[in-house]
Amino acid sequence: MQLSLHRRHGFTLLEIMIVVSVIALLAVIAVPSFLRARERAEAVAVLNELRLLDAAIAQYAVDNNKMTGAEITFWICNPI
């Protein structure tokens, strides 16, 4: 019985190409979903900030006896 001592262990070029193509296919599927999720998260953050601003304006109006719908002006000071 003859055993081959020169048997090579490793991957063939075809096997490596298949693995790379599968990874590329998964990336093509996942990237657009990730971008949409990020855009949705940014939109939700903006809406939450607008809600906070509206609540702060309403609280200011209550604290300073302003009428509903009265114009409220404010400015941001930059400390030196």
Image (cartoon, rainbow, N blue to C red):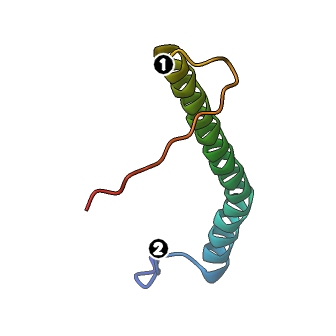
In this view, the residue farthest toward the left is: 80
Residue 7 in the image, given as x and y percentages of width and height? 46, 80
Question: Which is nearer the eye, 39 or 33?
Answer: 39
Q: Is residue 37 above or below residue 27?
A: above
Q: Secondary structure at mark 2?
A: loop
Mark 1 nearby-residue class (10 Å; few <14, some 14–19, many ≥20): few
What's under tag 1, amino acid-wise? Asn
Residue identified by numbered label 2: 1
Q: CA distance from mark 2 to mark 1?
A: 100 Å
Question: Which is nearer the eye, 42 or 7?
Answer: 42
Q: Residue at x 66, y 62 (%)?
A: 27
What's under tag 2, amino acid-wise? Met
* Mark positioned earlier in the residue sequence (2 or 1): 2
Question: Which is nearer the eye, 70 or 21?
Answer: 70
For the residues bearing labels 2 and 1, Cβ distance under 8 angstroms: no
Query: Does 70 sit left or right of 76 as displayed?
Result: right
Query: Does 76 sit left or right of 16 as displayed?
Result: left
Query: Does 7 sit left or right of 40 as displayed?
Result: left
Residue 55 in the image, given as x and y percentages of width and height? 56, 23
Q: Is residue 45 above or below residue 64?
A: below
Q: Residue at x 56, y 40 (%)?
A: 73
Mark 2 nearby-residue class (10 Å; few <14, some 14–19, many ≥20): few
Q: Secondary structure at mark 1?
A: loop
Question: Which is nearer the eye, 38 or 17?
Answer: 38
Q: Is residue 1 above or below residue 33?
A: below
Residue identified by numbered label 1: 64
Tell me the mark number nearer the camera, choosing from 2 and 1. Answer: 1
Quadrant in which residue 45 is drawn: top right
